[in-house]
């Protein structure tokens, strides 16, 4: 794709996100996007089949960017508070997409983020334990499901009732649980 085409595609995405901050997804049309962007309808359809395709690409990009920016060496608290800050800064946009898009696709992206975060966390934390590979797999599955469930609950509650302090406390509790599980496994009391 040439520079002008890339510029146009980026402008379409930015216009769409700007519109999402103003009104719910069902009220946004291709006509709104092209007027906001200052292009014609054909330019939109050259880049995207429809609005759901545009949403899919935006979510994929943001998910991949978040995953790429997260360093496995960072503490889990850093990753989660960064994600929380991003979500808070983009609350209207996220809720508009979450409430009015293909829920299964959105949850798939959310699952990918949870999987990446938990895998990085586990790699860091498991190096400090003597847990078996089977126990590690069980804990990863548990943490991934828990992370995913908490995020869905937060989204279903319109992204209310969560603070950075709660995230840090959640992480502290999990570290304590992992240490206790490792201690019990070492002593044979599992």
Image (cartoon, rainbow, N blue to C red):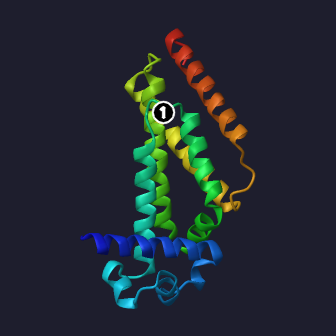
| Left or right position of 39 against 21 | left
Residue 124 sits in which quadrant? top left
Residue 102 spot, x, y in % from top left: 49, 72
User: For the point 43% across and 36% down, which residue is it?
Assistant: 71
User: For the point 56% across and 70% down, which residue is it?
Assistant: 97
User: For the point 64% across and 59% down, which residue is it?
Assistant: 155
Q: Which residue is mark 1?
A: 121
Viewer-nearest residue: 9 or 105: 9
| Left or right position of 73 against 19 | left
Residue 63 spot, x, y in % from top left: 44, 55
Q: Is residue 26 above or below residue 172?
A: below
Q: Residues within 10 Å of mark 1 (few under 14, many from 20)?
A: many
**Residue situated furthest right in the rendering:** 161
Q: How many marks?
A: 1
Residue 1 spot, x, y in % from top left: 24, 70
Q: Is residue 42 above or below residue 125?
A: below
Residue 176 spot, x, y in % from top left: 62, 23
């Amino acid at each position: 794709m040439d520079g002008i085409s890339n510029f146009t595609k980026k402008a379409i995405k930015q216009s769409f996100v700007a519109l999402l901050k103003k009104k719910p997804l069902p009220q946004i049309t291709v006509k709104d996007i092209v007027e906001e962007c200052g292009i014609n309808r054909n330019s939109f359809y050259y880049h995207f089949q429809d609005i759901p395709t545009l949403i899919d690409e935006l979510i994929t990009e943001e998910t991949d960017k978040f995953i790429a920016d997260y360093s496995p060496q960072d503490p889990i608290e850093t990753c989660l508070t960064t994600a929380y800050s991003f979500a808070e800064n983009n609350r209207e946009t996220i809720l508009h997409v979450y409430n009015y898009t293909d829920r299964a696709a959105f949850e798939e992206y959310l699952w990918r983020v949870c999987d990446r975060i938990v895998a990085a966390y586990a790699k860091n934390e498991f190096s400090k334990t003597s847990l078996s590979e089977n126990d590690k797999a069980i804990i990863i599955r548990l943490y991934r499901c828990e992370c995913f469930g908490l995020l869905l609950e937060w989204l279903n509650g319109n992204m209310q009732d969560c603070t950075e302090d709660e995230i840090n406390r959640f992480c502290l509790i999990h570290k304590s649980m992992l240490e206790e599980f490792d201690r019990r496994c070492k002593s044979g009391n599992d």
